[in-house]
Image (cartoon, rainbow, N blue to C red):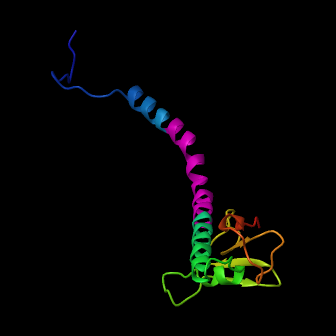
Amino acid sequence: MKILHTRKGIKAFTLMEVVIVFILLGILAVAVIPTFTEMDDVGYQTVQEGTLGALRTAWTVAYADSGNEAPTLDEVAALVTGVDTSATVCDCTDTDTQITCAEVYQADATTTKAEFGVSGYACESTVATPNLIVIIDG
């Protein structure tokens, strides 16, 4: 019996091996994709927590500027600025009794503003410690 078209020394993958590799890659992709879809929420939450950190730092600066007296929520909000340092990012209104920071997504990405506050405090009320400033769940 004569074998036609055989080449000596040539090695290649069989069709079955290639199919198995694609199946394994598909299984890995299905396992990893849900992790990536949750990354947006993690990013929004991280930005929100970073803004909270900026507010707590602003509290420390306001505390030092006022001669070691607790600042108001208004004073804290006024110290948080964006890239353009002349523009204030956060403000406080007595109707809401909370600090609202623009261009910061809430953790669930529903709005482009995050809200921070201290339970039971109005904007002109003093805040005893920076740790009292918390993220208000939207």
Residue furthest to the top in view is: 1
- What's the residue at 68%, 79% (across, down)? 71
Stretch in magenta = 26-48
Principal secondary structure, stretch drawn in magenta: helix
Looking at the image, which residue sits at the far front? 67
Front one among 76 and 3:
76
* Residue 54 picture location, percent across and down: 57, 71
Q: Is residue 19 above or below residue 106?
A: above
Residue 45 on the magenta span: yes
Q: Nearer the viewer, residue 59 or 9?
A: 59
Relative vertical location of residue 81 with respect to residue 106 in this rendering, above or below: below
Image-quadrant location for residue 87: bottom right
In terms of image quadrants, where is residue 133?
A: bottom right
Residue 36 higher or lower than 70, as above or below = above
Task: Report whether 19 appears left or right of 79.
Answer: left
Measured as percent of width and height from the top left, residue 69 is found at 67, 78
In the image, residue 46 lies in the stretch drawn in magenta: yes
In the picture, measured across the screen, residue 11 lies left or right of residue 129, that is: left
Nearer-the-camera pick, 15 or 85: 85
Q: Quadrant of the N terminus?
A: top left
Q: List x then y, in percent, for residue 25.
A: 47, 37
Q: How many marks?
A: 0
- Please report the residue visible at 48 percent of the width from the left and 33 percent of the height from the top: 24
Residue 8's place in the image compared with 67, above or below, is above
- Residue lying at the far left in this picture: please name it: 8
Q: Position of residue 81 (x, y in %)?
A: 55, 82
Q: Residue at x 20, y 22 (%)?
A: 6
Q: Nearer the viewer, residue 92 or 131?
A: 131
Quadrant including the C terminus: bottom right
Which image quadrant for residue 125? bottom right
